[in-house]
Amino acid sequence: MTGGLSEFHEELRAVARKIVGRPPSALGGLEPQILDWGALADAGLLGLEVPEGLGGAGATFAEVAVVLHELGRAPGVGPYLGSTVLATAALLLSDPGPARDELLAELAVGTKMATLVLDARTTRWDGPTFSVAPTANGATVAGRAEWVLDAAGADRLLCPAQGASGPVLVEVANTGDGLVVEDRPLADGTRRVGSVAAEGSPVLAGWPLPPGAVDDLVDLAATAVACDSLGLMEAMLEATVAFAKVRHQFGRPIGSFQAVQHACADMLVTVEVSRALVAQAVDAVASDTPAEERRASVSRAKSHVGAAAVEVCGKAVQLHGGIGYTWESGIHAYLKRATLNRALFGSPIEHRRRLVRALPGSPPC
């Protein structure tokens, strides 16, 4: 991503790949990898963006993107996106203080998990769906949100809410009174989403949100999903090429047939274009890029990669032949994850609409 950090990023990639696991170079063993949370914590991968004084590495989203890429290649099963990425980013946007710093430190070492209560289907924040009310003993929060990533397994829920003087981020315990968290069924078995309903749930802590903070988090989330989708595509391309070398038909490897070569070449071109777009989006999110320019980079990446990952994983199924359609091949897990990723934090058509709306003189669409 950032040229001066390329050597460090390669070392980070190697560490992440060793912990998360990598699909083999030929068919077999493509099932999703359950994340070893303790190993991720020991390697410092849970606290990359957490300040050094709180037990983290003090890095940027560019380093987190490297890990997200490897999680897509596995694909990794665990709350990394909800807890390590979104919850940490939300806390870093709030003012330092004992409650915030303590939770960040716990997230960095893996003793607690949190998630940002934000509908994962959105491309922009239309305002709080939760509200805070003062009480004699502090404050309570009420509201509801659907499609919240990693909600059921989180120890703490971070809810953007409407406070007395504007939007705030409030911390709520997952076991708090008046709180109902329910898992929602998904075809993709590698991710979890759930609904969160609060009715007078006690607020553990709260922090004012700066203007545009939640929209920034949505852009970050969309970029994170694009990184994951890129990893899926790369893994499927590598597995397909390896399979084409060892699978024989008519006494020859199928990789020697022109139709298969052209299909793999198309996959490679798609992956390379996606890699360039994701790199631009990551750089925009990780740096002080102006908001309009950042949003354009994010939408270009998410709109292209969201659709491209489904296309590449679908071709992988086809090029593996009959075995590609079986449960045992494991390829279905990549296709299902790519399909869900396409919808998370904005579908391709929604992000393309956002790009069109940003053009001078564009009509509403």
Image: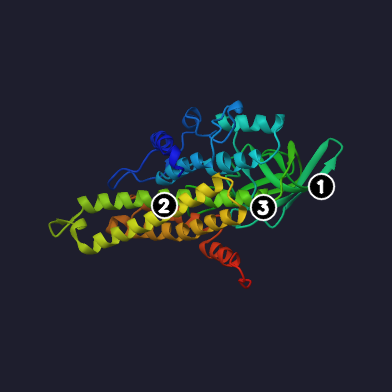
Q: Which mark is residue 145?
A: 3
Question: Which is more N-terminal, label 1 or label 3?
Answer: 3
Numbered disc 2: secondary structure = helix
Disc 3 versus disc 2: nearer the observer: 2
Q: Nearer the viewer, residue 283 or 204?
A: 283
Residues at circles 1 and 2 in contact by the CB criterion of under 8 Å: no
Question: Which is more N-terminal, label 2 or label 1?
Answer: 1
| Mark 1 crowdedness (10 Å alpha carbons): few <14, some 14-19, many ≥20 | few
| Mark 3 crowdedness (10 Å alpha carbons): few <14, some 14-19, many ≥20 | some
Residue in the image at 33% along x and 56% along y: 268
Residue in the image at 23% along x and 54% along y: 244
Q: Hey, what amino acid is under mark 2?
A: Arg
Numbered disc 3: secondary structure = strand
User: Residue 19, percent across and down?
Assistant: 41, 34
Q: Disc 1 to disc 2, how far (Cα)?
A: 42 Å
User: Residue 91, percent across and down?
Assistant: 65, 39
Q: Hey, what amino acid is under mark 1?
A: Ser
Q: Hey, what amino acid is under mark 3?
A: Ala
Q: Could one spot residue 224 in this view of the protein?
A: no
Q: Which mark is residue 165?
A: 1
Taking the image as shown, residue 150 lies to the left or right of residue 178, namely left
Disc 1 versus disc 2: nearer the observer: 2
Q: Which residue is mark 2?
A: 275
The quadrant in which the C terminus is found is bottom right
Q: Disc 3 to disc 2, how far (Cα)?
A: 32 Å
Taking the image as shown, residue 246 lies to the left or right of residue 268, namely left
